[in-house]
Amino acid sequence: MASGKPGTYRFSDHFKINKKQSQLDFVDIPLDTDIRLYVDPYALHISPVDWIRTAGALVVSYFDLLLQALKRGDKSKAIIMLSHLHEPNETRLGQSKGLPNGRGWGDRQARQLYDALARSKAIKSGLLKDIGDLELFLPGIAEDKISDLAINVIRSELVAYTQEQCELHDVPTEEVPAKAFWNPDEERWEATYAQLPVYKDEGVVLIPKVAVRRRLIPDGIEYYTHYILPFLQAEHISAKSALVTLLRNGERKVYKTDLRAQSKYRYSKEFLLEFSERNRRIFKSYKDLLPKKVEKPESDFVIESRQREPRQVVSTDLVRDLEQIPPGRGHASQYHNFIKGVLTGVFAPSLTRPKREQDIDEGRKRIDISFHNSATDGFFSKLVNQHKYVVPYVPIECKNYTDDIANPEFDQMLGRLNRRRGMFGIIVCRTIVDKDAVLKRCQDAVKNDPEKAITVLDDVDIKKLLDLAANGKTKEISAHLEDKLREVLD
């Protein structure tokens, strides 16, 4: 059970998942406090990850509907939409100083928010179009509340994700209240029960690492500092105002500190709104550059740094751990569990959302998993864009055999490959004695069906990939996989 100061007891501790943050697809949340990370609705909407982008589309449709209600003065509809936006304690994201405390907005706050939105010039002028713009223009709305709103809207997606991860890691679940989620078809909130992991009689909801950010985009301070102030500097220099300082080299300069000292330029959300209404071109240039600011998810090192008690991100003992797993059916489960953690860490963020495909336990448990292909660059992106394979998912078979894999294992993988599941698969095994025979089977698979490809990774490959990942050599990881595929295609 939890002990010590807040932040020391995590999801992986309570449910005995012996893996570090890098080996998990989700944020390993502390159970007795919050972690200072947020779900960014803008990042969701432009994510290269299909299901994350689908979640983002839910938030976009919700906010569009809310704006429509506000513009036509439909107070009852808008207040219904603004209800159920309490802080989602089950995710442990946010900035509570101690125990998760249920901050957020209740019914009274929902009415207050409606009043603030209904009066906002940003809505009347059409300047406010995205949910993230609330952080720029609406007093009292900060990144934590926007994140809370996004989580509430996409709760059904997050619950499904949590259930998959619990199945993958053998975490027990119970049927508990899952709180309300937004039903876009019915345009209403719906309460439901769901199978969730439980801590202290309450359900816990996991958040995928690719969905979290340290801060949200748009960011008012960034917009003010790097867009508005430089524009004002140029304006004052052009007008030769009293704020211009003449430097020794003859250059004219306006200091940002001098601009900030002017009451009419002082940072506030009201000032951001007034400036943006007068200078829509500057606001548009800022919004146009936002996609590049959220292209990459936060690294495991960043996520770990947000914890109250950071832990080592990459284990230095994984090679030793692999060597201590004996080959053979009797240790198949141990090997499978090890490999799913290794591949999660090595291939992230290109491969995400690992899911258990089959679970057979008749004295020889076999766990097959598949990953979503979320790659925007590197090997798994090249599979689609250069090699022209259909790879929405990457199925993986783990074989803790004492001898070489043979035709039955290749036939099994080939049988799993299709255009819906994916046409590229990976078999992971311990050792390959007859390398020519295994390579020939890979090559035959391609010759028999050019739309399909299989590659095989053994202990030597896994150790190399672990070394490359530990040293941050992501390009070399892609190069190694490309070399393996090239052998098959030659």
Image (spheres, rainbow, N blue to C red):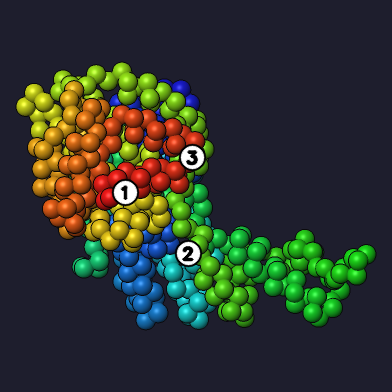
Q: Which mark is residue 472?
A: 3
Q: Is residue 304 above or below residue 116?
A: above
Say left or right for 275 vs 78: right
Residue at 28% from the left image edge and 32% from the top image edge = 458
Tag in front: 3 or 2? 3
Q: How many residues crowd mark 2 within 10 Å: few (<14), some (14–19), many (20+)? A: some
The residue lying toward the viewer, choosing from 355 and 338, is 338
Residue at 10% from the left image edge and 47% from the top image edge = 415
The residue lying toward the viewer, choosing from 140 and 41, is 41
The residue lying toward the viewer, choosing from 451 and 61, is 451
The residue lying toward the viewer, choosing from 396 and 407, is 407
- Residue type for callout 3: Gly
State the SS at label 2: helix
- Give the mark, 3 or 1, whose residue is nearer the N terminus: 3
Q: How many residues crowd mark 1 within 10 Å: few (<14), some (14–19), many (20+)? A: few
Q: Position of residue 346 (x, y in %)?
A: 38, 39
Tag in front: 1 or 2? 1
**Quarter assignment of residue 274:** bottom right
* Camera sees residue 486: yes
Q: Which mark is residue 486?
A: 1
Q: Position of residue 255 (x, y in %)?
A: 79, 64
| Quarter occupied by the N terminus | top left
Q: Which residue is mark 2?
A: 291
- Give the mark, 3 or 2, whose residue is nearer the N terminus: 2
**Quarter assignment of residue 262:** bottom right
For the residues labelled 3 and 2, the Cα–Cα distance comes to 24 Å
* Camera sees residue 159: no
